[in-house]
Every structure is written in structure tokens, then in C-alpha cells.
Amino acid sequence: MLTAMTGAVESGLIYAIMALGVYLSFRILDFPDLTVDGSFVTGAAVAATLIVNGANPFVATCLALFVGFVAGCMTGLLHTAGKVNPLLSGILMMIALYSINLRIMGRSNVPLLNQKTVFTTIQEWGTKIGLDSAAAKTWGILLSMTLLALLFKWFTDWFLQTEIGLAIRATGDNPRMIRSLSANTNLLIVLGLGLSNAMVAFSGALVAQYGAFADVGMGIGMIIIGLASVIIGEAVFGTKTIARATLAVIGGAIIYRIVVSLALRVQFLETGDVKLITACIVILALVVPQMVRQQKEKKRKEEKRRNRAQVMAVAATGKGEADVAVKRDL
Amino acid sequence: MLQLKGIYKVFHEGTPDEKIALQNIHLTLRKGDFVTVIGSNGAGKSTLMNLISGVLFPDEGTIWIDGQDVTMMPEYVRSRYIGRVFQDPMAGTAPNMTIEENLAMAYTRNQKRTLRRGVTKKRRDDFRELLSTLHLGLENRLQAKVGLLSGGERQALSLLRRPSPNLPFCCSMNIQRPSIQPERS
Ligand SMILES: Nc1ncnc2c1ncn2[C@@H]1O[C@H](COP(=O)(O)OP(=O)(O)OP(=O)(O)O)[C@@H](O)[C@H]1O
Ligand SMILES: [Mg+2]
């Protein structure tokens, strides 16, 4: 149980970087970018192929980030220069990336067993400072992934406060206004989508190394997982400021993983049901907060009405005679 | 100086919906001129403003700012020379961003936007001073989201977005909303 939990937190932290990317496109740019399903795999494919061919795993992971950036820019260009609708440009890029990913990997699945990955390297460092191999693995991964997720969070927070970052946020919020303030919204959309998909691909590269394989199908539904993390996080932790919202996204990604791993412990459910569970979680996260809000509103109104009725009743019984007196005076 | 020479704008040209919005418009405004454009609904006032600011492009004719032909210059480049207040008070500000962030974006409108912090301490002080000239108490609500402000407060805020006075030309347009235009007989 405990190992399952740490496993959920570990992968939650890795997927949190992807979720931050989705937060950038969906929430900041207000651009429903479906490229994610493809660019996640692109990151995994680039890293896995490079690692199998003997590249340094850290270099491979960083290259994945760069390739993801390019993929995101392509979607942005499709939309801005090509004037293709946002959803469609994402879907087109996702489909195109499927073939590109197959080309990168050369086949549909690249195993990374017994390869030197980011995670085996971290484990090695742990054993070097005297931890036993299991502890080095768990604590090493937990600690390094926490730091990494926080690093990306910090970067996002910082970037969105810069002059360019403010312009990107305004592009998602009121493009007409920021154009009238001499900002090239097309360029900002391309840049924003590039950064978003860079994070997604980086996360994909780490997931491949964590699970010790890259597979062309590993990105299916990734966008929904990202959205689930964003929505759950926002519902639980709130979105008052950017820093709060990005923290919420990380929290949401971890909660999502924990919920899925708990759900899979139910006898009846199988691994193949994960996507269905995900869809249900997203639907719940979208619908429940609304219902809760409506219920609260209703309760508050009822209470107010009751209070008002009470006040009226008191006034009627207590001041009945006074009122009569007043009327008589008139 | 702003000059419009022989401007034509026709919507849906060559279809049954054809609508000539502007026909052979000539206009010259010198520095310091103050002009009010009046016309009935659909007369073409907004179209004229959209042509000047670069949201629309004329079918014929040219537009000049300080001797430079800007007829085909895209809106985001031209807005360097033009201050603009939108007809709709909601259009001039970003609702999900704070007051200070909105002002910071206006502040950097004529410079290249960089990776420097948008709202610095010094700028915040400037904003506070600027806002206090409005006498709306907004200087104490710098971190409030603009979407929470009233329509009038938002409009006042967007009035502060004027380009700096040393720019070649500033065309500030405050178009009355149809709801408060004089009744037509
Ligand atoms: N994008 C467009 N497509 C088609 N016709 C348009 C378009 N924009 C404006 N028109 C037409 O051009 C004419 C001028 O419109 P415009 O918006 O400039 O009027 P206005 O003077 O600003 O009116 P109001 O006082 O109501 O704001 C109108 O007949 C309008 O129907
Ligand atoms: Mg108008």
C-alpha cells in the first residue's frame, strides 16, 4: 500500500510538469491544445531513442524539451499563420506527430530496461551517500522530482510576471486590448504553445525513463489527464494568484494519480479501465463543484429568507400597537 | 499629424448585402486638434476609427501618420502611435489580470517587451500616483482583478493607457455607447 502511494506521488510529480504545460495552453492562452497527446510521446520517443543509442540521459531529456517546443510552435503557426481553428490545429499536429514519433523510434515500442536513465543515475548517487538501493530509489526520485516540479512551477510563475509573460496572459484574456497596446498576439501564441509543449515533452521523456519504455500509444488521452490535474487542483486549492494556481496544478496531478491508483485496487477494475476512470474523474471534477456551489447558494438564500421572516414576525408582534399608534397620530 | 486621403470602405462588395460604409473621406488633423465626429447609428464612425487604428484596412485611399504611410501597417505596430479607448468598456482591459498588471502592459506599449518583471516596485509607485488622479480609490486596489471593477471604473482605467506625450501622434477616441446617445426623432 505504502509503495503504491509513493509510486503515485512520484508519477504525480512527473506528470505535474505535463499538467503545467496544459495549464499554460488551456488556462493562460485559453487555447484548447490537443497537440499534447502527440508531443508527450515525442518527448518520450526522442529521449528513449537517444538513450538506447548511448546518449547521456540528462542531455536526452533536455533535447526532448527542445523538440517539444518546436512541435508546439508548429501548432501555433498552423493557427496564427494558417488561420486554422485552435482545436483543429492541435488535432492535425497530434496526428502528424503520431507518424513522426514512429519514425523517431523506428518501431512502436522502445524498452529502456537495463539502460542508464535519469532515474538509475539518481539511484546511483543515493547509494553513493550510503543509502541502500531501495531507499535510494524511492527517496532519490521523490526528492529530485519534487525539486524538478517546483523548478518548473517557479519558472512558470516568474515567466508569467515578466513583460512578455503579462502580454501572453493578456493574449488569452483580451487579445483585442493587447493588440491595441502594440503586442503581436500571433507571436505570443506561438511562443506560449511552444513553452507549453516543451514542458509536456519533458514530462514525456521522464515518464518513459520512469516506466522503462516508450510506446507510440502512451500519449492517448494525455490531454484529459492534464486537464483533470488542472481542474482538480483548481477545485481543491483555488486560483487566487498565479503562484497559487500553479501549485494547485501540481497538487491536482498528485491527487489524480492517487485516485487512479486507489481505484485500480478495487477488484472489479482492470488496468484497461484507467481511461474510463480518468474520464469519470474529469466529469466529476467539472460537475460536482458547480452543484456544490448551487446547493450553497440555495441554502444561503433560504437562510436569509428565514431570517427575514423571523425579523418581520418579531416586528409584527412587538410593534403592533406602536404601529397602530403611529397611524392614529397621522 | 494624421491624414486620410480618399478613403473608401465597402462591406460585402458585389453582393446584395453591399454596404458602402465610407466614401471618399479626406481628413487632416494637426497636433493638438480636438475633433468630435457625430453621425447617426450606422453612419460609419466606428468603421472610421477601425481604419485609423488598423483593425480594418481601406479598399481605397491612404492613411498617414506624421508623413508615414501606415495604410497597411498591422494594428499591433500602429498602436504604438495611437491611443485608443474602446466603445465597449470591457474591451480596453484584461479582466482576469490585476489593475497593476493592466497598467504595466500599457506602460511597456512602446518598448520592446522583455523578460524583466512587469510590475516593479518603482512602477507600482508610479501607478499609485497615476491612479490617484482619478479619485476613484483605485490606488488602494492595485492587486484587485479588473473584472471585479464597475464598467465606469474599467473605462477610467483604460483612459490611463494613453501613449506617452512625446509620441508623434495621439488619437484618443471616446465613442459614446449607443445606450446613452441622444434619442433619434
Ligand atoms: N464588419 C462589417 N461587415 C458588414 N457591414 C459592416 C461591418 N462593420 C460595419 N458595417 C456596416 O457599415 C456601416 C457603418 O457602421 P459603423 O459601425 O461604422 O457605424 P457607426 O457610425 O459606428 O454606428 P453607431 O453609432 O451605431 O456606433 C453600418 O451600416 C454597418 O452595418
Ligand atoms: Mg459605432
Image: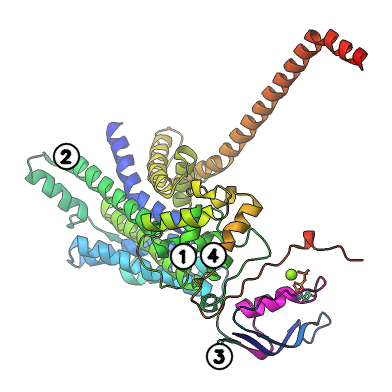
Q: CA distance from mark 3 to mark 1?
A: 26 Å
The N terminus of chain A - image quarter? top left
Q: Chain of mark 1?
A: B
Indicate the position of residue A281 as horizontal and vertical percent values.
50, 41
Local crowd size for mark 3, using a 10 Å CA cut-off: few (<14), some (14–19), many (≥20)? few
Task: Give yes or no for residue A106 being in the magenta stretch.
Answer: no
Q: CA distance from mark 2 to mark 4?
A: 59 Å
Q: CA distance from mark 2 to mark 1?
A: 55 Å
Residue A147 makes an appearance in the image:
yes
Local crowd size for mark 4, using a 10 Å CA cut-off: few (<14), some (14–19), many (≥20)? many
Q: Secondary structure at mark 3?
A: loop
Q: Are marks 2 and 4 on the same chain?
A: no
Q: Earlier in the sequence, mark 3 or mark 1?
A: 3
Q: Chain of mark 3?
A: B
Residue at numbered disc 4: B161
Q: Is residue B136 left or right of residue A189?
A: right
Residue A275 makes an appearance in the image:
no
| Type of amino acid at the residue the image marks with label 2 | Ala
Q: Chain of mark 4?
A: B
Q: Chain of mark 2?
A: A
Q: Quadrant of residue B154?
A: bottom right
Query: Which label belongs to residue B67?
Result: 3
Q: Is residue A310 left or right of residue B64?
A: right
Query: Are the residues flagged by discs 3 and 4 in contact, CB closer than 8 Å?
Result: no
Q: CA distance from mark 1 to mark 4?
A: 7 Å
Residue at numbered disc 2: A134
Mark 3 within 8 Å of ligand 1, using the beta carbon: no
Q: Is residue A298 above or below residue B54?
A: above
Q: Secondary structure at mark 1?
A: helix
Mark 4 within 8 Å of ligand 2, using the beta carbon: no
Q: Quadrant of residue A284?
A: top right
The C terminus of chain A - image quarter? top right
